[in-house]
Image (spheres, rainbow, N blue to C red):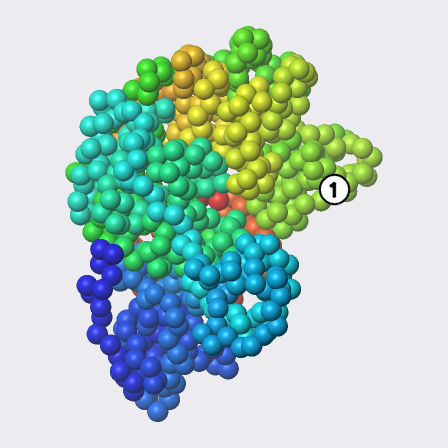
Amino acid sequence: MHSAAANTPEPFFPGTRVGVLLPLPLAGPYDYFVGSQMVRVGDVVAVPLGRREAVGVVWGAGAGGVDPARLRPIIRRLDCPPMPDATRALIDWVAGYTLAAPGAVLRMALSVPAALEPGRGRLACRVAAAAADFKATAGRARVLDAIAGLPPLAPADLAREAGVGPAVVKGLIAAGVLELVEMPPPPPFARPDPGRTGLDLSAGQRAAAESLAQAEGFSVTLLDGVTGSGKTEVYFEAVAAALAKGRQVLVLLPEIALSAQWLERFVRRFGVAPAVWHSELGDACRRLTWRAVAEGAASVVVGARSALFLPYPDLGLIVVDEEHDHAFKQEEGVTYHARDMAVVRGRLGAMPVILASATPSLESFANVQAGRYRRLLLPDRHGGALMPDIAMVDLRRYPPPRGRWLSAPLAAALAETLEAGEQAMLFLNRRGYAPLTLCRACGFRLQCPNCTAWLVEHRRQGRLVCHHCGHAAALPPRCPACEAEASFAACGPGVERIAEEAAALFPTARMAVMASDTVAGPAAAAEMVRQVAAHEIDLLVGTQIVAKGHHFPLLTLVGVIDADLGLEGGDLRAAERTHQLLSQVAGRAGRAERPGRVLLQTWDPEHPVLLALASGDRDAFIACEAESRRAAGMPPFGRLAALIVSGPDAGEVDDCCRRLARAAPREGGIEVLGPAPAPLAVLRGRHRRRFLVKAPRTVNLQASLRAWLAGVPAGKARVQIDVDPYSFM
């Protein structure tokens, strides 16, 4: 280990007052006194809390202020590696930045309670030191012959080795000839081999890889490479360098369920699979992985944003792949951006951080320009492949037939591509069959009973679904408003409707729909990616999950059904996000020797985002977007925070908002906008109002927010703070 025992904290001896942070939404540690067992900062301990026992982490010396006679003792120290200093520092930093309770952040780090105690090893047989007399049989003799000179074996393995039934081994154990001993479990993850030879890199890739591998101490590098430029293989060299030093590595991906091709590349490069961390792991796997990370037995972890809070004792490198992706922003509970917190974790642990993307965020560009990050550029695709040609289809000139969504130019391009034996992709960032269902007789729209959102038809499931709260219902036989029978019509397209239209046009094409509700988990996603790569699918219809990092050599055409989708609305990042998404989608085409092309269907071909895509002038678009944000004082050149006030009673929510509005801060250039009903004014049965707080970067926004909220009782309403909001719903 690089740092395991070097900074062992001073012990707290029995009778000492200590602060223990509990994984609960509490403002800080609770004081306890040390019982008969000495503890240190970072130790995981069991403590009394009311009438129950709770688990927490020793956070430091006690704060005082509580009569020592009222303090209760720590019950015991758990047999668990102590929480590393850098992890505890990250918890404190995230809590301070997001204004979340430290205990709520700790809960993300202690997310697997079952892992806090060591698991039981497997039981194995060996010859007892003092074997008792026993009745010899041929089977028993074979067992004793088999085990002679061998390490202890599990009873079933010993029976198999000796060619006898399990009962023979059990009889020897009962007779005292064999004894069961607990063996330590085998290492849960094989160590990757950093010395294996990777793919041949071009001169540009090699220079970037060597620069990344040589980084020492804290630094942040933006690896900016076009789609297909081999960014993964380049940063693998930095991973190899960290492993060669005996350090742990964390790679964050935005869609861990769609990481099948990434994992294949990792195995080819390092010989073994990494540890994987995401919310869909089973309980046993989560326990094994958490414990392996804490004990330093997991050398490389690839995971979703929550993997950042695992207790790495010797983390030496963090990679954030697709750093621009908004999936790195946690919107529920503790609201944080994993990319930004990864940079903080790198600084706290004095390690390099790599941010990789073909379409970097404006925040990362601003940090490069300010000299805080360095930038390595990969301007060319690997192996001589060319960037795809991008053209717009003006729907004002080529409108699809009524009730259809594929224009004549796109349909003709699909026919040509499929006839040539190549693959095509149709992209629409809208799940389901249709986004709106209304009555033809009276215009009544089917709405979620829990949210101010329309129900989306999912025809394959035969259900209407709310994409915000998950409410699902069957299509009613008659309209609730006018009682007209069979009067409901689907309005607008979702990916299922596009697939239906494409199937009618190309009935012999092998087709699949890839969306978050049609791909159930990592295994299903990996299988679909395999089918596309093996050319078992001719036409893939999908949402944004098809845009992320896949390499399909025969895919030469991408058609975007509604390139204007996402360009409107109150989201300050709408233009940037649309440019990133469509660039990533376009990047799936022509990644091998066959050239690719992209057709963007649009009603507004003069829009700056679409012009930038068609011209390939990304940097000019970014510069223009940055200038408009700078002029408006918006991130990354200004600071934003959102306050979302919610509750089941609209009157109580509005009362809380009035109290907050009267006390709102105005000093130092702070502007408070609102309160206003949120675009989703009701969500999961709770009424919602929003404030938007805007401030210069020189203002300590957290201090202002903390002082503001401390003076206003929320009553029965709940106030959620989102520093650096990415969603404005």
* Residue at the disc numbered 1: 474
Image quadrant in which the N terminus is located = bottom left
Taking depth in this image into account, of 104 and 549 the one nearest to the observer is: 549
Which corner quadrant of the image does residue 169 belong to? Answer: bottom right
Point 54% across, 8% down: residue: 420
Q: Is residue 20 above or below residue 115?
A: below
Amino acid at pointer 1? Ala
Point 58% across, 22% down: residue: 537
At label 1, counting other C-alpha atoms closer than 10 Å, the crowd grade (few under 14, some 14-19, many 20 or more) is few
Taking depth in this image into account, of 72 and 277 the one nearest to the observer is: 277
Which corner quadrant of the image does residue 59 belong to? Answer: bottom left
Residue 631 position within the rendered picture, expressed as x and y whole percent measured from the top left: 26, 35
In the displayed structure, does residue 692 sit left or right of residue 240? right
Q: Is residue 472 above or below residue 558?
A: below
Residue 459 position within the rendered picture, expressed as x and y whole percent measured from the top left: 69, 33
In the displayed structure, does residue 494 sit left or right of residue 37? right
Residue 26 in view: no
Residue 174 position within the rendered picture, expressed as x and y whole percent measured from the top left: 59, 73
Among all residues in the image, which is located at the extreme bottom?
69
Point 27% across, 45% down: residue: 243
Residue 728 in view: yes
Secondary structure beneath disc 1?
Answer: loop
Point 37% across, 38% down: residue: 271
